[in-house]
Amino acid sequence: MAGFENTHLWQSTLAKQLAPDEFERQREFLRSGYESFRENAGVLAGEIARDLPDFTVHDITHLDALWEIASIICGTSYYLNPAEAFVLGGAFLIHDLGMGLAAYPDGIDELKNTTLWKDTIANLSNRVSSVKIENAQIEKEATCIVLRALHAKHAEKLALISWGKDSNLFLISNPELREAFGTIIGLIAHSHWWFSDEIEKRLPSSLGAFERLPNEWGIDPIKIACIMRVADAAHIDARRAPAILNAFRKPNEHAQHHWLFQQKLYQPHVESERLVYTSKSSFSADEFSSWWLCYETLKMIDHELRDVDSILGDSKRPRFQAKGVAAINSIKHLSRLIGIDGWYPVNTEVHVGNIAKLVKNLGGEQLYGTNAIVPLRELIQNSCDAVRARRLLEQEPSDWGSVTVRTGRDESGFYIEVEDNGVGMSIPVLTGPFLDFGTSFWGTSLMHEELPGLESKGFSSTGKYGVGFFSVFMWGDSVSVTTRRYEDSRQSTKVLIFENGLSSRPLLREATGVEYVKDGGTKVRVSFSSEMSYRKIFCRNFDEELSLRQIVEDLCPCIDVNLFVEDLNNNDSGLALGANDWLDIVNEDFIRRALGNHNYIKLNSTELNKLIKLSENITTIVRDGRAIGRGFLSGLSRYYGREHQASIEGVVEVGGFRTSGLTGIIGFFSGVTMRASRDIAIPIANGFLLKEWATKQSDALLNYTNEEEQIECSSIIRALGGNPRNLVVAIHRDGGLNIQDFNAKLEKIDGEIVFVSNNSFFLLAREHGKIALNENVFVVNSGIPGILQVGRMEDDWIDWPSKETEWFHEGSIKGLLMEKLSSVWKCSLGALIDSSATSDDEKIFSYVIGKVKRKNITCKRVDIFRKPYN
């Protein structure tokens, strides 16, 4: 006799009863049907380990053991009729079968046709994009994830689908039983994966009796689902993780903790309405992680038992004998039941004592500094992500969707409101990841469930860390969030209100008529704590005041969503930025957008006219059909930028938003950032594309720049890996020299060659007047311009030096000219360096570089190159 046949629930329902049994024939009908069902399901359950070898046992022994666990939890006096027992046993049999590919008649191809598979593959591919990984590995991981995620949902139809060449093989062989109970068995099997409060909402409260059975053998699906739920959760003893099977399978490190703690557990029993778990041996200090995993699992079981007891008690159904887990509220007492050896089970997990303070600090000034504009950026960015998501889901064109930034004043004072027509939020999202500090909704299983197909369609969010929304509390404590899912009715609009910031619970309520979101999406309104806080948004360094339109132009210059402003305080409304219009704007509009209004208004006419001429050189960098950069080189940033307050530089954008500056480049480069504050980013345009763009700029700059500016531009082009071509790279007594001119001069000079840095030369010229240089002296830019100016991250972008040996000057004009010198002298670069005297921090060499009115001018820091001799 199988173990399950000895349990109380089986013996009192489907087992043969003492004579006389007036329902012997009906009972036999159900019993034989179940035994056939069990035999078929057992074969399928045995296949799960092939696809999920790291998981603990899910074969027929687990399915049979659920009868025993259920009997322990329910108690000996709990009543089920035989039909309910058949349905319960059927749910036991199929609830986990979907964790094996064998449960899918078309195998892996059936999984690959699901939206979840496509989303998972997209997610995994993005996650490992920087690591070389075989497609087979991605597919294997995707199979595991998708089987796990879909197994409960798939269980809903397992009792009804067929296998075999002629599609005539069913788990429930008897067609009458399959038709009568297949649907409800599948629904109850699925329910073990629902939240507990969904059981009463999604299951019928009762079903009548099958016509071949007695009238009193009706079914209570909610009662059965409760038994199914807690029995499956509570089966965690050694039968799930045999030691010899663990040795054979060798599960991964994470799974090993599950195997170890279950391997140590005896079967549970009930004392004082509590399910009692005990261990066969103690957990050593090396096994403490497994002990804590056991503790967390027991907490989960306790939670399930309490939830189910509430459902049964509130609906006046019979309650189970076990209503919780023993000692779960006392780690000290639990450690006597689940033994420990040589360590102390003190609950030292990281926790937050004052969540409101943490969120306000890390989600505000501690993360973003005192920049008052950051909350606006975060709100617009969240809105843009929502619009992009809806755009993809509804297959709208690339310029579809809008975000509106609105300012005004009401009874609470000044406010800013950001509204979008994006996907909106459901209650699970609004009360889940939206309020979970540090948890982003994008890329999660909840996103795959709420917005199926989004990730596989290429969606990538700008927000990744789940902290941006909380920056709004830098402005004030009164915040309202009004939202509705784009496919729901207007009446489904919800409002979440923070009245006292993070110091009290927010209120979630239904929207009133005037609050309805008309077209789906979200609206966030923040009331400022004071007028001064509001004014800070529009003042940069307290020396100028910008309009709302100018603020958003500076904030998100490359946004791909139409951005409108409604400045109710200044009567300014309309389109501020068109979706992707940075790809079309030119001349003065381009310059203003790139520099930002706060810099643009400080330009003098000379600077502006110079930049307008240079803007004729605007060139776009394209990769895989997508524009990833657009701009032109300028030699002004190093000269005018020093003497004036205006910072003449371009911008690296992430998700359309301004991040790092680009010295010497006027324009926009798309970038990536690894910082939650998103204040620093690295352009994605690099390698050949960057070199090609920089080299093309060299030709365009000839007609618009003087010698000093050309030297500056040459240095930038060289630093980007490009070729300055005909631009001036050095100044000689005869004037500016390009590379060809420099080579020609070298051919005529016999003896040593001297390089003087342009900074030192111009300083001496200002002090002494015009210097007549000696024939062998060349003024060059010896440094490498800090284009990105974000420390070591710049090295990650430009990726120099690329030579086998580390050589700092490779990225400089000086390095380029040294290469030309070694080529003319027919020697290696190493030999040239060894035979020469180059100044550095440790050694400084002086040299008479020329004359001013017959007076020798000595430069105290030069490089003297001498031709090496073998």
Image (cartoon, helix red, strand yellow):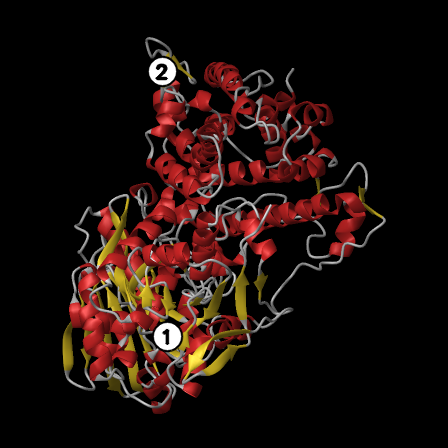
**SS for tag 1?**
loop
Q: Secondary structure at mark 2?
A: helix
In this rendering, is residue 674 above or below 766? above
Q: Is residue 463 left or right of residue 545?
A: right
Q: For mark 2, does the 10 Å Cα neighbourhood hold few (<14), some (14 to 19), or many (20 or more) residues?
A: few
Horizontal and vertical percent for residue 218? 41, 31
Marks 1 and 2, Cα distance to the nearest angstrom?
84 Å
Q: Position of residue 230 (x, y in %)?
A: 56, 40
Residue 175 tag number: 2
Q: Amino acid at mark 1?
A: Arg
Q: Quadrant of residue 116?
A: top left
In percent of width and height, residue 416 lies at 29, 78
Tell me the quarter of the picture where residue 150 sits.
top left
Viewer-side label of 1, 2: 1
The quarter of the picture where the N terminus appears is top right
**Residue 854: where, in percent of width, then height?**
43, 83
User: Which residue in the protein does label 1 denote?
Assistant: 638
Lateral position of residue 564 relative to residue 292, left or right: left
Q: Earlier in the sequence, mark 1 or mark 2?
A: 2
Q: For the point 25% across and 72% down, which residue is it?
A: 553
